């Protein structure tokens, strides 16, 4: 099995938009579930104050991450009405073009942390 990729992105929820974001996120799950079969897991966690949300996605390989990110610019336009990205952590080795795209989108002052060395493990 190729090395899996874990993609974690943290967001600040815009003031007064937490409930709208939650509904938007829940409404987006069916499309991701059916349209992005290489996305093994997509999980969202909110902090106690409903001020931040962290999305965790798991992919079997770098190509599945690439497929997941196709069309992301259109999907995130609506999402960014509710949230602002804070930082990204990637565990594994994304394709260089994908990493370049992520860094370009992230911009200056946005932290992108890469942990490339997969030691082993399993996904059920």
Image (cartoon, rainbow, N blue to C red):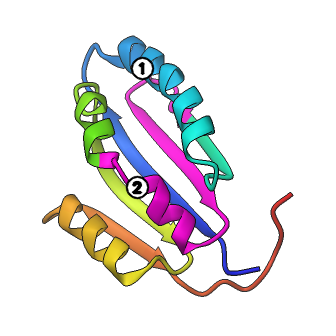
Q: Mark 1 points at which residue?
A: 24
Q: Give the range drawn in magenta.
A: 45-72
Is 27 situated above or below 2? above
Say which residue appears at 56% left-offset and 35% top-offset.
Answer: 45
Q: In the picture, which quadrant includes the C terminus?
A: bottom right
Q: Mark 2 points at which residue?
A: 69
Q: Distance between the residues labelled 1 and 2?
A: 18 Å
Say which residue appears at 83% left-offset and 69% top-offset.
Answer: 122
Is 80 situated above or below 4? above
**Residue 41 included in the magenta stretch of the image:** no
Q: Earlier in the sequence, mark 1 or mark 2?
A: 1
Say which residue appears at 57% left-offset and 52% top-offset.
Answer: 57
Indicate left or right for 95 with 39 as reference: left
The percent position of residue 87, horizontal first and vertical second, equals: 34, 56
The percent position of residue 6, horizontal first and vertical second, equals: 58, 63
Give the structural element (helix, strand or loop) at label 2. helix
Say which residue appears at 54% left-offset and 38% top-offset.
Answer: 32
Q: In the picture, which quadrant includes the N terminus?
A: bottom right
Is 93 situated above or below 39? below
The percent position of residue 88, horizontal first and vertical second, equals: 39, 60
């Amino acid at each position: 099995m190729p090395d899996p990729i874990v993609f974690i992105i943290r967001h600040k929820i815009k003031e007064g938009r937490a409930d709208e974001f939650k509904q938007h996120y829940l409404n987006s799950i069916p499309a991701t579930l059916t349209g992005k079969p290489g996305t093994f897991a997509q999980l969202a966690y909110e902090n106690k104050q409903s001020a931040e949300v962290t999305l965790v996605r798991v992919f079997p390989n770098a190509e599945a991450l690439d497929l997941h990110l196709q069309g992301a610019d259109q999907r995130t336009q609506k999402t960014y009405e509710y949230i602002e990205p804070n930082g990204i952590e990637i565990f594994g080795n994304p394709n260089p073009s994908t990493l370049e795209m992520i860094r370009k989108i992230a911009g200056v002052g946005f932290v992108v942390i890469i942990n490339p060395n997969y030691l082993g493990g399993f996904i059920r």
